[in-house]
Image (spheres, rainbow, N blue to C red):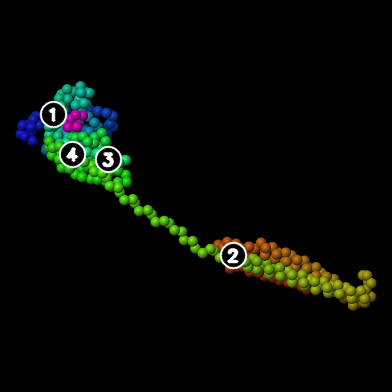
Amino acid sequence: MTARTASRWAVAGVALLGSIVASSDVAHAQPSASDKTVAESLFRDGRELMDQGRIPEACRKLEESQRLDPALGTLLNMAVCHEREGKIATAWAEFNEAMVEARHEGRQDRYDFASDHVKSIEPNLPRLNIQVPREVRVPGLVVMRGDTPLGDGAWNTGLPVDPGEVKIVAKAPKYKPWTTTVAIALKESKSVTVPKLELAPEPPKPPPTTTVIGPPPPPPEYWNNNRIAGVTVAGVGVAAMAVGGVFGYNALHKYSQSNDYCSGTTCTDQRGVTLSNDARDSARVADITIGAGALATAVGAILFFAGGPTESSPAADTSAQRKGLDLSLTVTPAVAGAGVRGTW
């Protein structure tokens, strides 16, 4: 920057800062009261830092103030700050925006101020032309200059950029990204051509899942506890009926013998009375044992045919330890009976 340019900068800066000391005009949507307060504080801090020559810090304050509460005065100060920071393409765009806002607000003084800076900056603008040939335009192609994506309307055109290193990235789905960095100085024009992107390797396919199938479960045991209990109970029942048959035969035999000493219900000999009583006792035992045996046989059959395999469970395993069978047969001259008690 020449001494003459620096002098003009100083005069213009003093005039601008004197005319917009407390400017915070709203350009678009109304910010909240809190945003306005913070923006005004940041604006004042930025102004002070710029007066102290701490340009990068001042620009960050003014950028945040403009974001919170857009205003023409803040925009002009921010453009001046960016120009002094060396970001002349950024400042040039901001001065052009300020010209539109100033004309909208009827502020000729601010319009002239921004217009003078635009004319001063334009001869020094670096320009970068990003060439994107048609043969490289794959579906989904995105071209970025720094952090800014460029639409296809900005391709193959020399556009103003801030001097320094400019990073260019081209990327598309299923392709490897391409990156380059271009160093560009004041008044310099450069062109960069995006090459044809390389296909990216396909991601490895996940290994097929395998399901390990173990041996089939063993068939259920046929002679389980229920069936064993059923056969046992049925066996006791058959035995009881056999005992009853013996007592029944004995009752018939003694009744036949008593007929030799008795006529009807009248007996002429004590032996007839004794034989008749024994016959009745034997008949009573026969009736009881045959009935109990039949019942036990029926219960055993039910247990056997209905006692299929059951799924095991912790509770079943516990109860299986308590499974058992208790059979009893009682036969006396006065009474006869059969008992079955068990857990299965």
Q: Quadrant of the N terminus?
A: top left
The C terminus lies in which quarter of the figure?
A: bottom right
Residue indicated by mark 2: 220
* Residue drawn at 24 percent across, 39 percent down: 132
Label 2 neighbourhood size at 10 Å, few (<14), some (14-19), many (20+)? few
Quote the CA–CA distance across marks 2 and 1. 98 Å
Q: For the residue labelled by badge 3, is the local secondary structure a helix, a strand or a loop? A: helix
Badge 4: residue crowd in 10 Å (few <14, some 14–19, many ≥20)? some
Choose the circle earlier in sequence order: 1 or 4.
Answer: 1
Tell me the distance, in whole angstroms, between the alpha carbons under discs 3 and 2.
Answer: 72 Å
Task: Give the answer, above or below, for where 288 lies relative to 44.
Answer: below
Query: Residue 178, position in %: x, y?
Result: 24, 45
Task: Tell me residue 41's x, y (percent).
Answer: 20, 35
Residue at the spot 19% in from the left edge and 32% down from the top edge: 93
How many numbered discs sit on the rendered protein?
4
| Label 3, label 4: how far apart the Cα atoms are | 18 Å
Q: Nearer the viewer, mark 1 or mark 4?
A: 4
Element carrying mark 4: strand
Name the residue tied to disc 1.
119
> Residue 199, how many percent across, how many down?
30, 47
Residue 191 is labelled as 4
Question: In this view of the protein, can residue 131 be seen by the observer?
Answer: yes
The tag earlier along the polypeptide, 1 or 3, is 1
Circle 3: residue type = Glu
The magenta region covers 92-97
